[in-house]
Image (cartoon, rainbow, N blue to C red):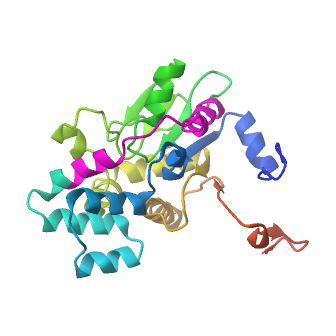
Amino acid sequence: MQYIPNGPDIPEALLEAHEDGKVVFFCGAGISYPAKLPNFGGLVKAVYDELGVTHNGAEVEALKAYKYDTTLGLLERRLPNGRLRVREAIANALRPNLAGKKSTQTHEALLRLSKTRSGATRLITTNFDRVFEEVIETKKTNTPTHAAPLLPVPKNRWDGLIYLHGLLDGTGSEANLNSLVATSGDFGLAYLIERWAARFVSELFRNYTVCFVGYSINDPILRYMMDALAADSMMGENTHVAYAFGNYTPSKRIKPNPSGQPKT
């Protein structure tokens, strides 16, 4: 179903799941573009610019492979006091510009769409920035928030906005900066070793229909989540169908054919 001319064709199954309060919107960096914030690749560039350093050979290769988390991890290890310096640069790069009329439009819409009939909020972001916080404060939405690693279990009584990879609290404290999941080492701890993020994602997909908004296909964040889900599938776990909104050009739009197989 299309709600606006030339807009996305929303599958009926997704609309029904939303009506039943079973949809969770999972938000990436793309939703913050109107606030002049970068995607993961742009964030890496901004960190190098902020620190006034250039890439070495290994970092160049990681960038070419779109392994932005690996790039930041290599940089942290290369620089003196690198962990703190890189994270301070991340914080500086994620200061939003909220002057534009559309700077918070998507965040406002997602906060509305994520409300269930009972008033609970079912919304997740892997962004560190504080644009949602600005909207919550300005619009007085009374939305509970939870920042990693202190996360609720995503089951029926869950209520709130989840910052799955941490949130910049504005203090610039070393403890807050260290809580961000930004480098390959951080992702390894969160998804592979301590596995608190992997457990959260697995439980989420078992209980809800997830709709991704603001991610690119090369996003390392999606890679880690899909790896976690693949591990669950190998163990025989059942998960709901997931959806994603993305940009396309009319010539490359995928349309279903009568046989049920997608075609361009």
Q: Which residues are magenta?
A: 86-114
Quadrant for the C terminus in the image: bottom right
Q: What residue is drawn where x is 77% and y is 42%? A: 15
Q: Is residue 187 left or right of residue 226?
A: left
Q: Tell me which corner region of the image, top left, top right, bottom left or bottom right, holds residue 80.
A: bottom left
Residue 52: x and y in percent read 21, 62
Q: Is residue 38 left or right of residue 251?
A: left
Residue at far left of view: 80
Residue at far front of view: 99
Is 25 drawn above or below residue 52 in the view shown? above
Q: What residue is drawn where x is 14% and y is 68%? A: 78
Task: State yes or no: residue 60 in magenta.
Answer: no
- Picture mark count: 0
Residue 98: x and y in percent read 48, 35
Q: What residue is drawn where x is 65% and y is 28%? A: 116
Q: Is residue 209 left or right of residue 129?
A: right
Task: State yes or no: residue 101 in magenta.
Answer: yes
Is 21 drawn above or below residue 74 in the view shown? above
Q: What residue is drawn where x is 33% and y is 76%? A: 62
Residue at far right of view: 258
Residue 230: x and y in percent read 50, 66
Residue 137: x and y in percent read 46, 21
Q: Is residue 260 left or right of residue 204?
A: right
